[in-house]
Amino acid sequence: MKIEAILATKVQEAVQKHYEVTPENIEFQPTRKDFEGDITLVVFPMLKQVKTNPAQLAENIGNYLANEVEEVAGFNVVKGFLNIVINDQFYANFFNDVRAREDYGILLPQSDASGIMVEYSSPNTNKPLHLGHIRNNLLGFSVSEILKAAGNEVYKVQVINDRGIHICKSMVAWKKFGNGETPESTGLKGDKLVGNYYVKFDQEYKKEIAQLQEEGKSEDEAKAEAPIFVEAKNMLLKWEANDPEIVKLWEMMNSWVYAGFDKTYQALGVDFDKNYYESKTYLLGKDEVLKGLEEGVFYQKPDGSVWIDLSDEGLDEKIVLRSDGTAVYMTQDIGTAIQRFADFNINQMVYTVGNEQDYHFKVLFLILKKLGYDWAESLYHLSYGMVDLPSGKMKSREGTVVDADDLIAEMTETARTISEELGKLDDYNEAEKEELYRMIGLGALKYYILKVDPKKRILFNPEESVDFQGNTGPFIQYTYARIQSILRKADFDYSGDLSKDFQFHEKEKELLKQLQLYPETIALAAENHSPALLANYVYELVKTFNSFYQNVPILGTEVEEDKIFRVQLSNLVAYVIRSGFRLLGIDVPERM
């Protein structure tokens, strides 16, 4: 049982004994470093029930705990805060329990547990993945791994937006200007080739709009009547009518994109248990809309389009089928959600999608609820902020995005430059160096993004992320490699248990207290869908270890029991760093 749980029970007993009430709010926090103690009880919330002086209340509780709880070695009261000292035996028992466990902090799923599905990536097949997709993928993958570590069965999925007007734009542009070029003939990744034609479409579209405006059309008229746009709209109608020529072109260009995506996912280190395709689920969505129309969930406007009115819920009207019968994103998302709950035994669904889609998901969840699906209550939108660069916001159609592959390559190059400047790789062969540069570069990128609360916007600075000092991936990786160096030099048996009466150095005790927090940090990160909580925990652990390393001799101590314990302690810290980073999707090097 956690020490806080033991103390909470005894605090209730103490208050009941002295004041004949049972306190409802018992709040603990770590003791501030400038005071003696390990755990602090905040007594102020109890004063609503207990009418007394806070210092006297703390003193009475402290005396009771010192007499009744064997783990309590002493206490002190500072302005109504009860600082409790936990004895060394408690920490020795904790350490002996966990030091050799290979799954410390990790819960295995129960055999009868229904699962959680996490959707992430969800790209369009008209452009390559960019920096925004990287945050999406890293968040979704890490949240999946954290939920799994918290004892859940987890399914990782993506929905590929492989149909719609935006896809047809790339297809029209390739057909008009492509001259039959392919990834093989150009040497380009397929997603990049198709993305170039999405940009080309936008360039030509703007020219046609300008021409029509010169001829006297209004801007709205010009946008609607531009020939290349009309051609894309007609192509979408033909695709939905299953026109063989259009379907063949669509299949060919999408296959190029999928091959390109797979290479990027592999480089980024993310994967999926199942792919869903909008082209396969939008028809199910259309059927649901038509059924909902009959049942009065939706209504039809005079032009034939189908809508839902959510003004009673504080939202707006939302279109679910266009007047020409073609589907919108909402139609597809309705169908995909229904299909997923039919395919898997899940009780929760997490959508990893940027915060510009907050309104969309409020509407989607409400629609599914109105259609009668009970599981709509368990849908969750993991909404995250955009990623900016010092140069400003990215725009796909203008070709000003930061390409994901280019960024991964740039991070590896930045890691190479900095590592070579530090000059510690003389005994590495070329293959080992390349793997280390990749590990450091990707670790820097992933950590820089994941350490930020998902809800916050990020200004991404590649060079800052690869700094070997401060709250960065490389700093944590370097500490892990330092511990591995210690372990390689420990040429003696350090497998025995710690004696129950072992007396800890204050720096050892600080590390043990930090290590104790690992399981609850995983649980908190899972509950909040926030890898940032875990990332920053690992950083605090590493800072605490480095303070220990600088102040306490490990292999250099003359006392054999101290030496064995400090190597074991270092080994457990290394395990938690590796385990925590694995949940963030980050590798750690054995040496640097």
Image: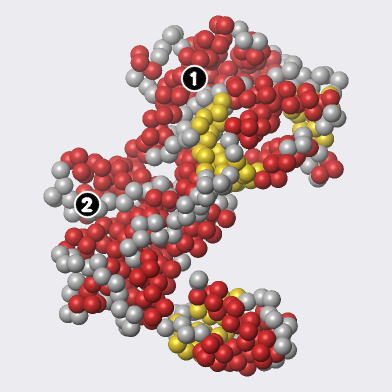
Q: How crowded is the residue under tag 2: few (<14 C-alpha within 10 Å), some, or many (20+)?
A: few
When the figure is inspected, residue 245 is found, relative to residue 506, above or below; the finding is: above
Of labels 1 and 2, earlier in sequence is 1
Q: Secondary structure at mark 1?
A: helix
- Residue 94 - label: none
Q: Which residue is mark 1?
A: 254
Circles 1, 2 touching at the beta carbon (< 8 Å): no
The image quarter in which residue 47 lies: bottom right
The residue at 51%/11% (across/down) is 249
Side (left or right) of 449 relative to 290: left
In the image, taking residue 350 as reference, residue 483 lies left or right, namely: left
Disc number lying in front (1 or 2): 1
Indicate the secondary structure of the residue bearing disc 2: helix
Q: Residue at x 48, y 35 (%)?
A: 273
Say if residue 468 shows up in the picture. Answer: no
Q: Name the amino acid type tagged 2.
A: Glu
